[in-house]
Image (tube, grey):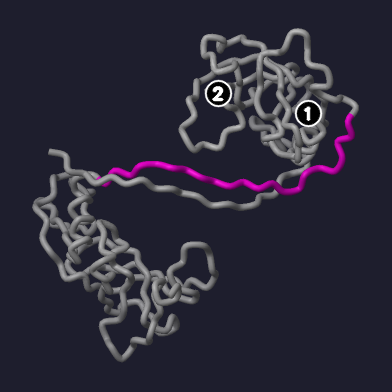
Amino acid sequence: MDTSLAAPYTTAFGFERTVGPQIGAFLAGLRARRLLGVRVGEDRVLCPVAEFDPVTSAATGDLVELEPSGTVTAWTWVDPREGWDEPIDSPYAWALIRIDGADNTFFHRVDTGGDPARMTPGLRVRVRWAADPVGSIEDIVCFEPPAEPPVPGATDPGAEIGEPVATIEAPFHVDYTYVAGVGRSVYLRGMAERRFLARRCPGCHQVYFPAPDHCARCLQVLDAPFEISGTGTISTFCIVNLPFPGQLVDPPYVVAYINLDGTGNKLQHRVLEVAPDAVAVGMQVEPVWAPETDLEPSLASVRYFRPVDPTLRVPVADQEARDA
């Protein structure tokens, strides 16, 4: 019987990246509601543009203006989930579109009014521009079948492009469900009981914590779980000096790989209650558990590790103390 634990997770971070001169000019063109391509060699045009030829790695050439229209070559239908921040109200397609005059394909949304029957390879589409373009790929809201008659003022080939875009914001956000599997669910349930539950391979005798279902060396099914102490030895570490969102203590502090006693693999965790410059490879450490009310089937039930030697310890404020 499968008794795997599962939980929703979110991976999210934001950063700003620079763009090259060709891509910067392409984005500036979108800001002016003009679609630009770039020449590659003597007889090819790319849109979206690239700084270098993807085949030869040579620098790309002159920018050329293209009509903001093209032909769908392939597509997949999307039914947005509740909570998604979408610029289109109805279901739509993600498609590969060959822009007129270009030799590659453009990956973007296609809006057919929520009707998947209208999507087909060979469908002619045209750009729908954002109301307030800023120099981003999102200045193209989507592509759509062209209106009959064409919408006046949909694009302005005489608009001033202006200075190239130098940097763009590129946030990343993924919501997903992590399924732990039967083996790792045993270890997670142990965490909620303040127990380190390991498993041993009957063939090579490797001991794992956390343990999968099968040995990574010889692929045999691991033996039944057994409890270990949770103490261990630092094998390598780094000192975190820079602040970032989500930290439970203020820098500087130590993150280490710990060889738990009796096991053959390593566990990564914070090492606190010790001056960072006093941490050393070979230091013996022990776990510090969360209060009973905060225990959960997660490694977060171990707040951190600290030196076994009490003479090395210094006070540390955990998250609750700092937020109080």
- Which residue sits at x=38%, y=85%? 315
Q: Describe residue 17's horizontal placement relative to residue 152 as left or right.
A: left
Residue 262 at what x, y percent from top left?
Answer: 17, 67
Residue 193 at what x, y percent from top left?
Answer: 18, 63
Q: Which residues are magenta?
A: 159-180
Closer to viewer: mark 2 or mark 1: 2
Which of marks 1 and 2 precedes in the sequence? 1
- Which residue sits at x=68%, y=35%? 137
Dot 1 alpha-carbon crowd within 10 angstroms: few under 14, some 14 to 19, many 20 or more = many
Q: Nearer the viewer, residue 72 or 264?
A: 72
- Which residue sits at x=75%, y=28%? 40
Residue 90 at what x, y percent from top left?
Answer: 55, 23
Tag on residue 36? 1
Q: Describe residue 52's horizontal placement relative to residue 170 as left or right.
A: right
- Secondary element type, mark 1: strand
Is residue 249 in sight in this rendering?
yes
Is residue 217 in sight in this rendering?
no
Above-or-below relation of 214 to 302: above
Above-or-below relation of 42 to 161: above
Tag on residue 90? 2
Label 2 and label 1: CA atoms lie apart by 29 Å
Q: Nearer the viewer, residue 143 or 293?
A: 293
Q: Which image quarter holds the C terminus?
A: bottom left
Q: Nearer the viewer, residue 38 or 161?
A: 161
Q: Is residue 168 magenta?
A: yes
The amino acid pointed to by label 1 is Leu
Furthest toward the bottom, the residue is 311
Residue 72 at what x, y percent from top left?
Answer: 61, 15
The part of the image, by quadrant, that contains residue 47 is top right
Above-or-below relation of 135 to 152: below
The amino acid pointed to by label 2 is Ser
- Which residue sits at x=83%, y=17%? 152
